Image (spheres, rainbow, N blue to C red):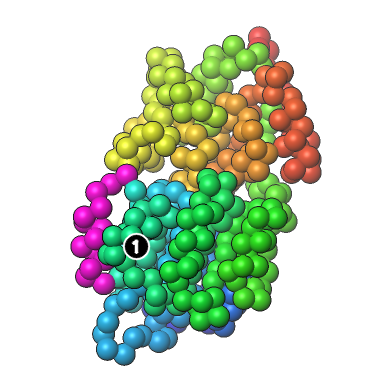
Amino acid sequence: FESLGLEAELLRAVSEQGYSEPTSIQQKAIPVILEGRDIMAGAQTGTGKTAGFTLPMLQRLGEQRPPDGRRPVRALVLTPTRELAAQVGDSVETYGRHLAFRSAVIFGGVKINPQISKLRHGVDVLIATPGRLLDHAQRGTLDLSQVEILVLDEADRMLDMGFIHDIRRIMKMLPPRENRQSLLFSATFPREIQQLAQQFLVRPERVEVSPRNSTVELIDQLVYPVDKRRKRELLSHVIGAGYWKQVLVFSRTKHGANRLAGQLTADGLNSTAIHGNKTQSARTRALSDFKNGKVRVLVATDIAARGLDIDQLPHVVNFDLPNVPEDYVHRIGRTGRAGQEGTAISLVSPDENKLLKDIERLIGKEIPKESLEGY
Ligand code: AMP
């Protein structure tokens, strides 16, 4: 980290986190961001991208403080989900703990008034989901005209979630792109993302870590072919027989997630579901119960799982395959993070064979298949 040009206060925070070596995205992105350039970075969660933009962003903000002690919002990080916003917020606090910045996280699903009063007291770094951010802007409780650094985190997911119009509206509230620094992070680069970059970035430096859409190498991937009706039974068996203590299971639908969590619990495997219909406090509770081991199985939908940062998650199971092949890469990226090994198992029924083929085409390899006796 010392060679990247970061100042002492940031290096101290990094070493207190126990990081000795920068990850590959950090090595590539930090020097470019410190130079003040725009970047378009290809990096999925688990690569250390959050520190990759947070560290140099805080340093840049520290280099030029507004003269008169005013506190306009100077950096804006947009994220697709509440969970990711909260996690980025935690990172800003962690890495900035020896610097005097104020940050705030704003997202929907919680009361707006505490957020308003926080904004009124002055915030240097704002982390937000698009909808609630616009809410504040419309109430006049937020001024984005002084933003110096903009981060679009998980941009592909923001587009998938239909935030493109919100993003365009937010861009109009910022200083023109020539007068700010813009950093775009995305796991994938479909044409829409490239258009977004063309519109909102200035001659971005392209930074990429693992080749596009390739899956993390440390992850052991396996497919269990199984009859649709017997998936739940097989899942309980695999978790029980393997003595798995912490499993993240993906379900395509909210309803399916609820039902599966109930059934697994009835099978004696303490489970809970996390999805977009749950309140923010229910989601936070589910996540913390899972992290501290109270709950053994967390059943999640794709959107809810996006951005979940669970250190060293050993097992991910696809109870059903995602409709969009890119989601497979996002899902299994929940394991094998920061150099840890992990397993990703997919329960695939005959009707999903086409989805499986699409996934294998995307990741450029065939996933090993193993039939379990009796299934
Ligand atoms: P991210 O991709 O930003 O979600 O980060 C993934 C995980 O890697 C987080 O749990 C970070 O705390 C961790 N991490 C970030 N940078 C490093 C590093 N240089 N060394 C070890 N772990 C890291």
In front here: 285 or 301?
301
Counting labels gives: 1
Taking the spot 56% from the left edge, 56% from the top edge, the residue there is 155
Q: Is residue 125 above or below residue 214?
A: below
The residue under label 1 is: 137
Q: Quadrant of the C terminus?
A: top right
Q: Position of residue 102 (x, y in %)?
A: 30, 70
32 sits to left or right of 361: left
In percent of the image, x 45 and y 63: which residue is there? 170
Q: Amino acid at mark 1?
A: Ala
Label 1 CA crowd tier, 10 Å (few <14, some 14–19, many 20+)? some
- Magenta includes 168? no
Relative to 131, say whether 234 is above or below. above
Seen from the viewer's position, the closer of residues 60 and 109 is: 109
Q: Residue at x 59, y 79 (%)?
A: 37
Q: Secondary structure at mark 1?
A: helix
117 inside magenta stretch: yes
Q: Is residue 318 visible?
A: yes
Give the vertical position of 144 relative to 240 (above or below).
below
Is residue 162 shown above or below 115? above
Place of residue 314 in the rendered image (x, y in percent of width and height, measured from the top left): 53, 39
Q: Is residue 45 left or right of residue 216?
A: left
Mark yes or no: residue 337 visible: no
Q: Residue at x 51, y 51 (%)?
A: 163
Image position of 143 (left or right of 209)? left
> How far across and how far down the image is residue 124, in percent?
34, 73
Q: Which residues are magenta?
A: 109-122
Q: Depth check: give the residue in front, 142 or 91.
A: 142
Q: Residue furthest bottom?
A: 67
Where's residue 12, x and y in %?
Answer: 40, 74
